Image (tube, rainbow, N blue to C red):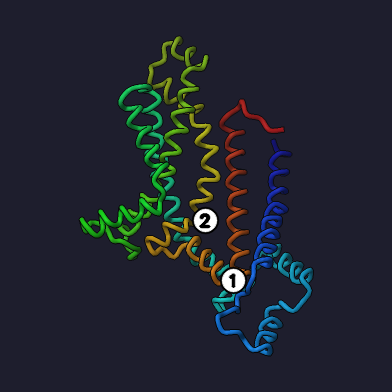
C-alpha cells in the first residue's frame, strides 16, 4: 500500500508537466498573439513587446523558462492584467468556483443518493420509474438551457431569487441548482445500479438469514458496497466542479475560475492559461488519488500492489 501511494505521488508531477507542455504547445501553434489587434502595431513597438516578455528568445529557451517557473510554483505575471501575478488571480477567483462547486455536489449527493436508493429498493415500481425519468431529464437538459429557464421562472416571473450574483446567500441558490442537476442524475443512476447488484449478493442474503432487520441490512451492508460507483465518480466530478463551470458562471455573472479561464483564452494570456490548466490538473490528480486511498481503507476487498 505504501509503495502504491509513493508511486502515485511521483506520477502526479510528470503528468502535470506533460499536460502543461501540451497546452503550451497548442497555444504557440495557434495563430496570433496577445498583443494582436485589428490595427497592426509598428514593427519597433512589436519588437519591444516581444523583448519585454521574452518572446524574442529561441523556442526551446522560452519553454525551459516556462517549465522552470512552473516547477517552482510561480506561474509568472498575467499578460493582460498588468501588475497581477497568475497565482494572485487564481487565489482571488478560485473561492467563488469552490463555493458553488462544493454546495452543488453536496446537493447532488443528497438528491442523487436518495433517488437511487429508493429506485433500487422499489425496483419496477412507480417510484423507480419516476426517479429514473427525472434522472434522464437531468441528463438531457444541459445547464446552458436549465440556467436561463430557472432565471426566467424564479427571477423574472416570481421575483423570488436574484438573477445574478449579488453577494447574498440567495444569489447562490440558482447556480447551485443548475450545477447540481446533471450530477444528481448521474449519482442517482450509479447508486441504483450499484445497489441492485449488491442487493443480489450472497453476503446480503446471509445477513438477512442471520435475522438482521432490513434497515440494518440496507445501511450496514448494502449501502457500503453499493456506493462504490459513486465514490469513483466523486473524484473527477468534484474536480470539475471546483475548477469552475464556464456556462453557469457566465449565466449568473460569477467571477469564478471557469469564467476567468475563458477570458484568458480569448486574450491569449499564456501565463494565466498555463497556470489555471496546471492548477486544475493537479487538483484532479490529487482528488483521484484520495479516492483510491479511500478504497483501500474502506473496502478491504480492493488491494493495491
Residue at 38% from the left image edge and 18% from the top image edge: 214
- The residue pinned by badge 2 equals 243
Residue 66 x, y percent position in the rendering: 71, 68
Left or right, residue 110 beside residue 289? left
Residue 198 x, y percent position in the rendering: 49, 22
Residue 89 x, y percent position in the rendering: 53, 69
Secondary structure of residue under mark 1: loop
Count numbered badges in the picture. 2
Residue at 70% from the left image edge and 53% from the top image edge: 13
CA gap between label 2 and label 1 equals 18 Å
Vertical arrangement, residue 21 with respect to residue 110, above or below: below
Secondary structure of residue under mark 2: loop
Residue 215 in which image quadrant: top left
Left or right, residue 289 beside residue 238? right
Whether pointer 2 and pointer 1 mark residues with C-beta atoms closer than 8 Å, the reply is no
**Looking at the image, is mark 2 or mark 1 nearer the viewer?**
1
Residue at 46% from the left image edge and 62% from the top image edge: 256
Vertical arrangement, residue 145 with respect to residue 41, above or below: above
User: Which of 135 and 272 lies nearest the eye of the viewer?
Assistant: 135
- The residue pinned by badge 1 equals 269
Mark 1 crowdedness (10 Å alpha carbons): few <14, some 14-19, many ≥20: many
Amino acid at each position: 500500500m505504501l509503495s502504491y501511494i509513493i508511486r502515485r505521488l511521483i506520477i502526479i508531477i510528470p503528468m502535470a508537466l506533460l499536460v502543461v507542455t501540451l497546452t503550451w504547445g497548442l497555444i504557440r501553434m495557434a495563430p496570433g498573439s496577445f498583443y494582436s489587434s485589428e490595427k497592426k502595431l509598428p514593427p519597433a513597438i512589436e519588437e519591444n513587446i516581444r523583448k519585454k516578455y521574452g518572446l524574442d528568445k529561441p523556442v526551446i529557451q522560452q519553454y525551459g523558462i516556462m517549465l522552470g517557473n512552473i516547477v517552482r510554483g510561480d506561474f509568472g505575471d498575467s499578460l493582460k492584467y498588468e501588475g497581477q501575478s497568475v497565482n494572485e488571480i487564481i487565489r482571488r477567483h478560485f473561492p467563488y468556483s469552490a463555493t458553488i462547486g462544493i454546495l452543488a455536489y453536496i446537493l447532488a449527493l443528497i438528491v442523487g443518493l436518495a433517488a437511487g436508493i429508493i429506485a433500487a429498493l422499489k425496483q419496477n415500481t412507480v417510484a423507480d420509474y419516476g426517479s429514473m425519468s427525472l434522472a434522464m431529464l437531468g441528463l438531457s437538459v444541459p445547464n446552458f438551457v436549465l440556467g436561463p429557464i430557472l432565471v426566467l421562472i424564479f427571477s423574472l416571473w416570481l421575483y423570488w431569487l436574484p438573477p445574478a450574483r449579488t453577494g447574498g446567500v440567495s444569489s447562490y441558490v440558482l447556480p447551485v441548482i443548475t450545477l447540481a442537476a446533471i450530477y444528481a442524475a448521474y449519482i442517482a443512476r450509479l447508486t441504483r445500479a450499484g445497489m441492485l447488484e449488491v442487493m443480489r449478493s450472497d453476503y446480503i442474503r446471509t445477513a438477512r438469514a442471520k435475522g438482521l432487520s432490513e434497515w440494518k441490512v440496507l445501511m450496514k451492508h448494502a449501502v457500503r458496497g453499493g456506493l462504490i460507483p459513486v465514490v469513483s465518480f466523486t473524484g473527477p466530478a468534484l474536480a470539475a466542479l471546483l475548477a469552475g463551470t464556464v456556462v453557469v458562471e457566465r449565466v449568473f455573472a460569477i467571477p469564478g475560475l471557469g469564467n476567468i479561464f475563458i477570458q484568458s483564452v480569448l486574450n491569449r494570456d499564456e501565463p494565466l492559461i498555463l497556470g489555471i490548466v496546471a492548477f486544475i490538473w493537479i487538483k484532479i490528480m490529487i482528488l483521484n488519488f484520495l479516492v483510491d486511498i479511500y478504497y483501500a481503507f474502506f473496502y478491504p476487498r480492493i488491494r493495491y500492489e
